[in-house]
Amino acid sequence: MRAIVHRQYGSPDLLALKQVDRPVPDADGVLVRVHAASANIGDHHVVTGKPYLIRLSPYGGLPRPKNPILGATMSGRVEAVGANVTTFRPGDEVFGQAKSGAFADYLVMPANMLALKPTNLSFEEAAAAPWATTALQAFRAGGLKAGQTVLINGASGGVGTWAVQIAKALGARVTAVCSTRNVEMVRALGADEVLDYSTQDFVAGGARFDMMLDLVGNRSLSDCRRVIVRGGTFVPCSGGGGDWVGPMIRILAGLASFPFTSRKFKMFVNTPNRDDLLILKELIEAGKAKPVIDRRYLLSQVPEALTHVGEGHQRGQTIIRIAE
Ligand SMILES: NC(=O)c1ccc[n+]([C@@H]2O[C@H](COP(=O)([O-])OP(=O)(O)OC[C@H]3O[C@@H](n4cnc5c(N)ncnc54)[C@H](OP(=O)(O)O)[C@@H]3O)[C@@H](O)[C@H]2O)c1
């Protein structure tokens, strides 16, 4: 089968399309014929090996990448199942987020990391959807409730476009921050108010929110505290912070300082799981959320796709078409 192979950290141009053996499912595994995957900023971090801390995580590896095939979020059709798998059968259309291996013709995943694909999405659209679990888990971490106000900084990217829609579905009032060219798109996703960061400063504006979801990390923690009401919550979910430990310093500073400020600091790490995929499936099938697709690439074009994603200005998500 074809696969995008990741042998060394560096530029996406170092990735290569190779022929490799098709994986075989173990007793709890599901072999999926991958129809589409999405290329996300997380994949870009894994390719570059930066921040360096990622090399110590299950996604990285030392001294070189330990997961030879790149790619995480995907959709496809079940080809075969292991002896213990009773939840899926060949032919089922599924979506999910793997640790790695999605930029390939076939992928084996644990059955409990997959769900049936939303019936109203194409494979390409469904490949984008698992990334939405980040937004869902961020609002869960922050305890967002109906009737509350939320500020979403970085509303036009892969997580942000889902976050706007999920916050609305939870019954919150949404203020979204994005660049000029994305204002109308973010408004159309349901944001109640949209601030264009090139002309409006969300801190200077003086508004206060029950929660701030930060997907950019471009403002100081004291600026972020200033826009949150007493008793409100800051949920950090951003890169930045340099090549070594990335956002870790900011997270430690937030954990140490927020308890003295009558505001909560709730960090989380996205944990893919079937229960959250099922919540998303329900939201999507009810018409309450949908993917925003920026560009589409072929499997052989993953280096170009990841170069685009790494520039940090994708509009929604970038899709890799795999099954012809
Ligand atoms: N904690 C976790 O488990 C977890 C999981 C997933 C993702 N993340 C992190 O979450 C962050 C967002 O991920 P993503 O997939 O949404 O990234 P993305 O698709 O690359 O989106 C980034 C967005 O940020 C916007 N942006 C850039 N500068 C901005 C500014 N000054 N103000 C407001 N928006 C700005 C860009 O929009 P414009 O083009 O309009 O500038 C772009 O749409 C990343 O740092 C990622 O690493 C964390």
Image: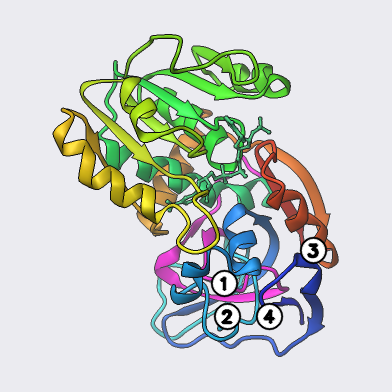
CA–CA distance in space, label 2 to label 3: 17 Å
Q: Which comes sooner in the sequence, label 1 or label 2?
A: 2
For numbered disc 2, what is the local secondary structure? loop
Q: Which-is-in-front pick, marks 4 and 2?
A: 4
Q: Which-is-in-front pick, marks 1 and 3?
A: 3
Residue 66 lies in what quarter of the image?
bottom right
Residue at 39% from the left image edge and 67% from the top image edge: 112
On residue 303, the disc is 3
Residue named by callout 1: 100
x, y percent for residue 189: 58, 23
Q: Which comes sooner in the sequence, label 2 or label 3?
A: 2
x, y percent for residue 10: 70, 71
For the residues labelled 1 and 2, say whether their Cβ atoms are less than 8 Å apart: yes
Specify whether residue 5 is painted magenta.
no
Residue named by callout 2: 67
* Residue 307 placement, left or right of 45: right
For the residues labelled 1 and 3, say whether their Cβ atoms are less than 8 Å apart: no
Residue named by callout 4: 8
x, y percent for residue 197: 60, 21
* Residue 197 placement, left or right of 272: right
Magenta part of the chain: 94-121
CA–CA distance in space, label 4 to label 1: 15 Å
Q: Which comes sooner in the sequence, label 4 or label 1?
A: 4
Give, as a three-letter code, the residue at label 4.
Answer: Gln
Residue at 69% from the left image edge and 83% from the top image edge: 7
Specify whether residue 104 is painted magenta.
yes
